Every structure is written in C-alpha cells, then in structure tokens.
Amino acid sequence: MANDIYDFSAQDFKGDEVNLSDYKGKVLLIVNTASACGFTPQYKGLQALHDKFKDQGLEILAFPCNQFKEQEKGSNEEIKSFCDLNFNIKFPLFSKIDVNGDNAHPLYEYLKSEATGILGSKSIKWNFTKFLVNKDGKVVTRFAPVTKPASMESAITALL
C-alpha cells in the first residue's frame, strides 16, 4: 500500500513516464478532465490558479478521462492541441486514463481511498473531480466537479 502520491508514476501526454516524486514539496491539484464536458471551461479557472500560485509551489496535474459519456474521445495529441488552442494551459497534461473500474489508474485508486466523496463514496462521479494534495504528498480533500477552481483558493493558500 502506498504511503503518499510519490509512490506513483503516470505517463504524460507524449507517453513518457513521470514519477510523481518529481513534485515533492509542491502542493498538487489533481484533476480528471474532459474536452467535451459542461465543466470543460474550468480549464480556464485551473490555468488562472496555475498562473497565480505556480511561483508559490502549486502544480496542477490534468488527467484526461473518457469514462463519463465519452466526453474525451480524442488521442492524447488531440487533447493537448484542444487544451492549448482553447485554454493555453501551461500545467502538465497526462495521458488519458480510467479513474474507475478494473482498469483505473493506481494513482486514482489511491486518491479515491484517501479522500472519499459524498456519503463515503469512493468512485469518481464525473469529469473535473479535484484532489488537493499537500507538500508531503498526502491527500487533503476532494472537490466535486461543480466546484469552481477560484473557490478553492483559500484551501490552496492554506497549504502553500
């Protein structure tokens, strides 16, 4: 069993393996994203958080997922192009993953076990569920998809 998120790695959108230990000492906001979702405009808010807090130690990690009404159908390259063209994101975009089910990425299995949703539910209910992780790699809280990035500022600054 993992002790913190630093025990995991994931592939970036190019397919290169990234050890999450590369983010030691940073506050992380880990988000499952989609390009064709009603919450997709949250990319703009996530980029605003990135711009405002990157120099203070915030990293946002985006994990595209196609498990919710197939709202992320594109290839990793198409997803990256969409994000760059529409939102000019400057935070890391990872390869498309599953967040629920038998093929769920191990990182997401860990996140869900550390911060459950409403009524103790472990499954991710929709795109743009957000996990806030402290500088020690411990999951602090989970935010629902409807939670706008700007409304998380106080929780983020408390950890920075």
Image (cartoon, rainbow, N blue to C red):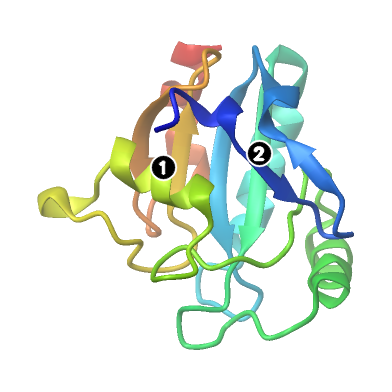
Q: Choose top left, top right, bottom left or bottom right for residue 50.
A: top right
Q: Helix or strand or loop: what does disc 1 sit on?
A: helix
Q: Total marks drawn?
A: 2
Q: Is residue 90 above or below residue 153?
A: below
Q: Helix or strand or loop: what does disc 2 sit on?
A: strand
Residue 91 at x, y = what percent?
77, 42
Q: Which residue is mark 1?
A: 111
| Quarter of the rendering occupied by the C terminus | top right
Q: Nearer the viewer, residue 125 or 87?
A: 125
Q: In 3D space, how far apart are the residues under numbered discs 2 and 1 (Cα atoms)?
A: 15 Å
Residue 59 at x, y = what percent?
68, 31
Q: Which residue is mark 2?
A: 60
Instruction: Single out the mark in the foreground, 2 or 1.
Output: 1
Q: Residue at x 68, y 24 (%)?
A: 21
Q: Nearer the viewer, residue 146 or 1?
A: 1
For marks 2 and 1 on the same chain, the one whose residue lies earlier in the sequence: 2
| Quarter of the rendering occupied by the N terminus | top left
Three-letter amino acid code of the residue under disc 2:
Ile
Numbered tag placed on residue 127 in the rendering: none
Q: As drawn, which residue projects farthest toward the front?
A: 1
Three-letter amino acid code of the residue under disc 1:
Leu
Q: Residue at x 30, y 43 (%)?
A: 113
Left or right: 38 with respect to 51? left
Q: Choose top left, top right, bottom left or bottom right for residue 47.
A: top right
The answer to whether residue 148 of the structure is visible from this angle is: no
Residue 132 at x, y = what percent?
46, 33
Circle 2/circle 1 CB separation < 8 Å: no
The answer to whether residue 16 of the structure is visible from this angle is: yes
| Crowd band around label 2 with a 10 angstrom C-alpha radius: few (<14), some (14–19), many (20+) | many
Residue 82 at x, y = what percent?
82, 72
